Image: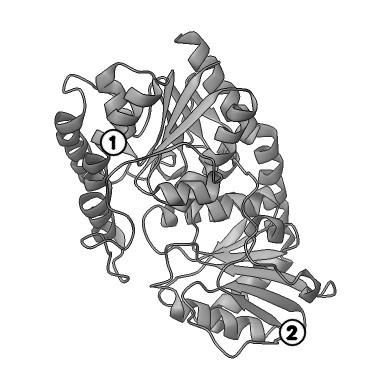
Amino acid sequence: MSGFLFVVPPLTGHINPAVGVAAQLTAHGHRVAWACPDPALVRRLAGADADVFACAGPVPGAPGAVRPPDLRGAEALRFLWEWYLLPLADAMAPGVAAAVAAVRPDVVVADQQAFAGALVAERLGLPWATSATTSAEFSGAYDGLPKVAAWLQRRLTELRARIGDPAGTADPRSSPHLLLVFSTPELIGPQAPLAPHMHYVGPSLAGRPAGPGFPWEWLDHGRAKVLVTLGTANADAGGRFLAESLAALRGRADRAQAVIADPGGTLSGTAGDKDVLVLPSVPQLPLLERMDAVVCHAGHNTVCEALWHGVPLVVAPIRDDQPVVAAQVVDSGAGVRVRFGRVTAARLGGALDSALHDPAHRAAAARIRAAFRAAGGAQAAAAHLERMAGENR
């Protein structure tokens, strides 16, 4: 049997896809360990018995890493790299090296934003695979931004000199050995690159802790059902958007019910409401089986989980990779985009009507659903990693 070390940032959307792959490898008898700055988060998502090595590093909300909620575009990208991703890599590198020494893995599986995993593996001469938990960089996002691409490359070169092999040449975001992309060209679009070491495996979904009981009996089978969620990291920015969503959905209460995830507690006065259910968290995967549309921030995990279930979307990207993922949704035909910062109840309602009632959106979502399920998900990703480990033993 082989050993695998998953190196992940302390971000739910980047850990969740790896959880399903790790579970498959464990079921096949392999040794699996994790390196992450937040072991408690990994154990909450992967199970209390997960073997996790703590790596020092900033976590969301830590001093110096709190991003102003109104930051957008190039400034948001610069903040993400200079105040989060690069410091995270520097801080994680010693812990990743210690985990490698303890686990002695056959393969390091590095999240595409956990640069320390790739660079430490490269420096130690270990084979490493990339877990691409967002497909934004495979859509040609930087094709028209050569200065941005060059700036990012300079920062990575400087990082390699600090924690990696200065003679190395591989981009730590993209392993030359094995690149697992948790999407498919049907969503990414015709610009999706192809290479022998690249494998589009579709979403990796695994069972998750159920959390507090959800009132399934509340759902009205006579009305369309809509989920509104902005993910786990946008509570600081989502108050206005959720309020407009609430207003739009109340205006459609005769034909639609809504479940709104409100982790920041910005909405009130909905207790006992038969039309809108507001909760701090929801069991997203089982809930998506019953939804007719999803309104979200275009986070990669949420988009892929919705489309796995064939559910069309209204996307309102906020920052980071979300505008690119939103463009994928629109270009594929599987949904409608609205402006997060300027949306009104009327505009959101119109977009929602389109997502619910335009058969073209549902047909596109069904097409992507079929592609996702054919791609193999966690099982396919695990098989590729097993082959890589076997080839390098």
Q: Residue at x 51, y 78 (%)?
A: 242
Q: Is residue 163 above or below residue 12?
A: above
Q: Are marks 2 and 1 in contact (CB under 8 Å)?
A: no
> Residue 316's spot in the image, x, y percent?
48, 66
Q: Give the image quarter of residue 21.
A: top right
Closer to the camera in the image, 27 or 119? 27
- Left or right of residue 131, residue 287 in this image: right
**Which label's residue is closer to the chain start, 2 or 1?**
1
Which amino acid type corresponds to the residue marked 1 in the rendered image?
Gly
Q: Is residue 331 left or right of residue 56?
A: right
Quarter holding residue 86: top left
Task: Report the quarter where the N terminus lies.
Answer: top right
The reply to whether residue 244 is in sight is yes
Q: Is residue 186 above or below residue 328?
A: above
Mark 2 lies on residue: 274
**Residue in the image at 43% along x and 45% along y:** 136
Residue at the far right: name it. Answer: 222
View extreme (bottom): residue:
269
Q: Looking at the picture, tell me which residue is in the foreground, 131 or 152.
A: 131
Q: Nearer the viewer, residue 171 or 40?
A: 40
Q: Which residue is label 1 attached to?
A: 95
Q: Nearer the viewer, residue 264 or 82?
A: 264
Mark 2 falls on what kind of element?
A: loop
Above or below — where is 15 with respect to 257? above
Residue 210 — which label?
none
On screen, residue 107 versus residue 275, left or right, reads left
In terms of secondary structure, where does tag 1 sit?
helix
- Image position, residue 99 (x, y; %): 34, 30
Residue 275, image x and y in percent? 71, 83
